[in-house]
Image: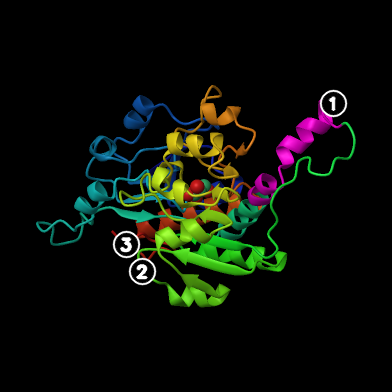
Amino acid sequence: DSARVYVTRKVPPDGLEVLRKSGRVQFELWDTDDPVPRAELLKKVRGVDGLLCVLTEKVDAELLDAAGPGLKVVSTMSVGYDHLSLEELKKRSLECVYCHFHLCRGIRVGYTPDVLTDAVAELTVALLLCTSRRLVEATHEAKTGGWGTWRTLWLCGYELANSTVGILGLGRIGVAIAERLKPFKVKKFIYTDVAPRPELANMINAEYVSMDELAQQSDFLTICCALTPETQGICNKNLFSKMKETSIFINTSRGGVVNQDDLYEALATGQIAGAGLDVTTPEPLPTSHPLFTLKNCVILPHIASASYTTRNAMSVLAANNLLAGLRGEPMEKELKL
Ligand SMILES: O=C(O)[C@H](O)CO
């Protein structure tokens, strides 16, 4: 007998194929590119065994209550999991003490690290160069008649050669970014995290520094940490005020780690030279947002993992995690609750 699964978005074809071929699940799909309305989602999850979601779905007490006690697996097609209420999931992840036959196993959670590391690192480098060498401004000038003649300091930016690159939150993605930046002749990599991470740091010869030192020394500061209560708004006035006027701030993690009012202030007053953001709060960022008025701020619509290969790989991993969870087997990538 097959498990009932709700898939909250049009998932790339490779992942859907995995679900279809398994012959183990009966799944219903919200078959569009836009998020399923919340009320519809709450209706659709009623009585399901598994949920395959993306990062726009809040998996909280309300949703878990709506799903009911039969929900065994939540599999998110993302490496980030700040949209999942871990507290609630944890409460419900415990095996039922009254159930001697493990009929009631509690909820398990799958996510998709690693498969997107290359795509995210690549995009981060692209965004960094785009911001530091002012590419958006430059194409705009070329297209709109601003290109008068060759001028000595016009559209000058900042180069990576001989620079110090700072990484806030050193994980797989931070390492992959540093590996790609190294051939640009970066002088030094520095990082900060809750504690030193020597195994990762040694791979890129990065030095552990304090948050203040990271701000003060980085010519390029790239944010690679997860969004948690501890990192919420961590990039704020205090951090920007310690950065160099010539430094470039890049964020491809989550918008919530940045205090956007403080960032606007830092960019508008020249406290820092530029920012490249792939993530914002909210998403989409309203077109009327002040950050869009700044020439020194490049904003992308959360596309770091958006390559065909990677999005398909994410969907396959999310589907496999879901199936493993439903079978009661170890998942390829399971979140420890
Ligand atoms: O968390 C994630 O997976 C990214 O933000 C989107 O790929």
Q: Residues within 10 Å of mark 2 (few under 14, many from 20)?
A: few
Element at badge 1? Answer: loop
Would you say the beta carbon of the disc 3 residue lies within 8 angstroms of ligand 1? no
Tag 2 or tag 1, which sits nearer the N-term? 1
Residues rendered magenta in the picture: 127-147
Element at badge 2? Answer: loop
Residue position for label 3: 336
Q: Position of residue 7 (x, y in %)?
A: 45, 40
Q: Is residue 87 left or right of residue 284?
A: left
Q: Hey, which residue is sitting farthest left in the picture?
A: 98
**CB-based contact (under 8 Å), mark 1 and mark 2:** no
Residue at point 23% right, 57% down? 105
Residue 190: which disc? none
Residue position for label 2: 195
Q: Nearer the viewer, residue 290 or 310?
A: 290
* 214 relative to 147, above or below: below
Which one is closest to the eye, mark 1 or mark 2?
1
In space, the residues marked 3 and 2 are separated at their CA atoms by: 20 Å
Q: Position of residue 64 (x, y in %)?
A: 26, 40
In space, the residues marked 1 and 3 are separated at their CA atoms by: 55 Å
Q: Nearer the viewer, residue 70 or 168?
A: 168
Element at badge 3? Answer: loop
Q: Position of residue 152 (x, y in %)?
A: 83, 44
Query: In the image, is residue 15 part of the stretch drawn in magenta?
Result: no
Residue position for label 1: 145
